[in-house]
């Protein structure tokens, strides 16, 4: 019987069996229909061989196993079988970085660690650096855009961003390209990108709340703020957006999703104030001493970190965040209040000393004190 089964299996399918509904049905998926060959079965198999016979009837032969893997037969009404193949991993993103200074290079390192392709364009020539780090460098943004990257990442300074964005040849990019920025202010680039970009382009405003100094030992637990300003809800653009953000998540960042307006309110009271204090301290020309306290060393480090950034960055934090002026006013008021507190206490202390001293000076009938001055209350105050 086994040879008969193999003979029919070699034809690719068993004969059709009539069903009660009048339609025909082929052999069901992966299960040989031995009912069609019931006449070939032994009527009374010996008890000793019953188990082996049952196993032979229910187990497909090597030829049947091969056919099941290549061209398995199934009924017309059978549902499609679920694919057993593993999901194909997403292809690496091709990220074009516009502005490849210190911060652009810093971000590029994280992109490459996650297996993505980095393209770069900048006014300065970084071709040697890029060649040694496996990055394609382009002399112009036009040349970079001809490569049609999946994501165009703006890493220019705050002050130069508007000119950079308006000069990008968007016609050379795909209509669903994602444009992202990493500026320290967020409402300004959001409004700019919404104004300049064609309607189909995706927009993600991000702010890695760290830099080459604070993130030199890794990005773990460092905050990464983002706002999906305009991203298609489904399709390739949504998938690429999630893939781009996952880069920072995989690097260990603490992902914080918030609106651009909310970000700027928080940043004015934290980042801008931090830079302002550091800039003020730098004007004092503070030096390390043999008796430094931990607090003083913290101030020295703050000053060092602040002045390591360009003044253009600090000016950009002030110029392009509408909340910065309010914070600067509050800082001035706070400084004046502290000064008044000190002056007020000093005034009370001096007044008390003058009054007490006057009370202990003996009076002279001529109205003169022992030192020849008048003993009048006004003279005592002098």
Image (cartoon, rainbow, N blue to C red):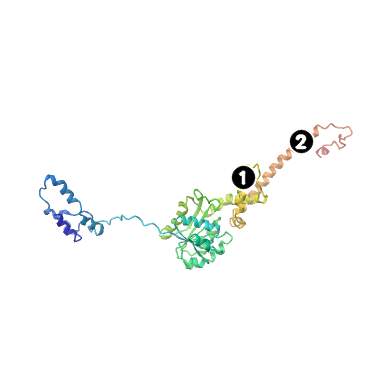
Identify the image quadrant of residue 341: top right
Helix, strand or loop under label 1: helix
**Mark closer to the chain start, 2 or 1:** 1
Task: Give the residue furthest to the left.
Answer: 43
Between circles 2 and 1, the one closer to the viewer is 1
Q: Can you see residue 16? A: no
Q: Position of residue 271 (x, y in %)?
A: 58, 51
Q: Position of residue 105 (x, y in %)?
A: 52, 58
Q: Residues within 10 Å of mark 1 (few under 14, many from 20)?
A: some
Q: Is residue 219 above or below residue 159?
A: above
> As drawn, is 148 to the left or to the right of 337?
left
Closer to us: 373 or 286: 286
Position of the N terminus by quadrant = bottom left
Closer to us: 232 or 179: 179
Helix, strand or loop under label 2: helix
> As drawn, is 308 to the left or to the right of 131?
right
Q: Residues within 10 Å of mark 2 (few under 14, many from 20)?
A: few
To which residue does mark 1 refer?
297
Position of the C terminus by quadrant = top right
To which residue does mark 2 refer?
353
| Residue that appears at 75% across and 38% down | 350
CA separation in Å, label 2 and label 1? 38 Å
Q: Position of residue 248 (x, y in %)?
A: 47, 53
């Amino acid at each position: 019987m086994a040879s008969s089964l193999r003979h029919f299996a070699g034809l690719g399918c068993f004969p059709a069996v009539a069903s009660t509904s009048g339609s025909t049905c082929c052999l069901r998926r992966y299960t040989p229909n031995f009912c069609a060959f019931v006449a070939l079965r032994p009527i009374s198999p010996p008890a000793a061989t019953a188990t082996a016979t049952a196993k032979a009837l229910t187990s497909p032969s090597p030829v049947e196993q091969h056919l099941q893997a290549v061209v398995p037969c199934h009924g017309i009404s059978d549902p499609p079988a679920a694919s057993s193949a593993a999901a194909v991993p997403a292809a690496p993103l091709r990220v074009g970085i516009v502005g490849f200074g210190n911060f652009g290079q810093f971000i590029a390192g994280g992109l490459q660690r996650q297996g993505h392709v980095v393209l770069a364009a900048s006014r300065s020539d970084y071709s040697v650096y890029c060649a040694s780090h496996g990055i394609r460098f382009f002399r112009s943004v036009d040349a970079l855009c001809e490569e049609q990257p999946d994501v165009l990442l703006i890493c220019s300074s705050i002050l130069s961003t508007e000119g950079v964005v308006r000069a990008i040849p968007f016609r050379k990019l795909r209509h669903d390209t994602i444009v992202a920025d990493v500026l320290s202010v967020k409402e300004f680039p959001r409004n700019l990108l919404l104004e300049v970009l064609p309607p189909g382009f995706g927009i993600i405003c991000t702010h890695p709340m760290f830099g080459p100094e604070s993130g030199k030992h890794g990005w773990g637990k460092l905050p990464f703020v983002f706002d999906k300003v305009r991203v298609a809800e489904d399709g390739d653009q949504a998938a690429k957006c999630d893939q781009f953000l996952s880069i920072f998540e995989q690097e260990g960042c603490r992902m914080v999703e918030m609106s651009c307006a909310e970000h700027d309110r928080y940043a004015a009271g934290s980042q801008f104030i931090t830079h302002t204090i550091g800039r003020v301290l730098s004007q004092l020309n503070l030096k390390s001493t043999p008796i430094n306290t931990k607090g003083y060393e913290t101030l020295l480090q703050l000053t060092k970190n602040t002045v390591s950034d360009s003044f253009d960055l600090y000016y950009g934090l002030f110029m392009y965040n509408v909340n910065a002026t309010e914070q600067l006013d509050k800082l001035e008021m706070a400084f004046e209040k502290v000064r008044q507190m000190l002056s007020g206490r000093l005034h009370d202390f001096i007044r008390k000393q003058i009054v007490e001293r006057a009370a202990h000076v003996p009076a002279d009938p001529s109205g003169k004190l022992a030192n020849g001055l008048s003993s009048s209350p006004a003279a005592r105050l002098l």
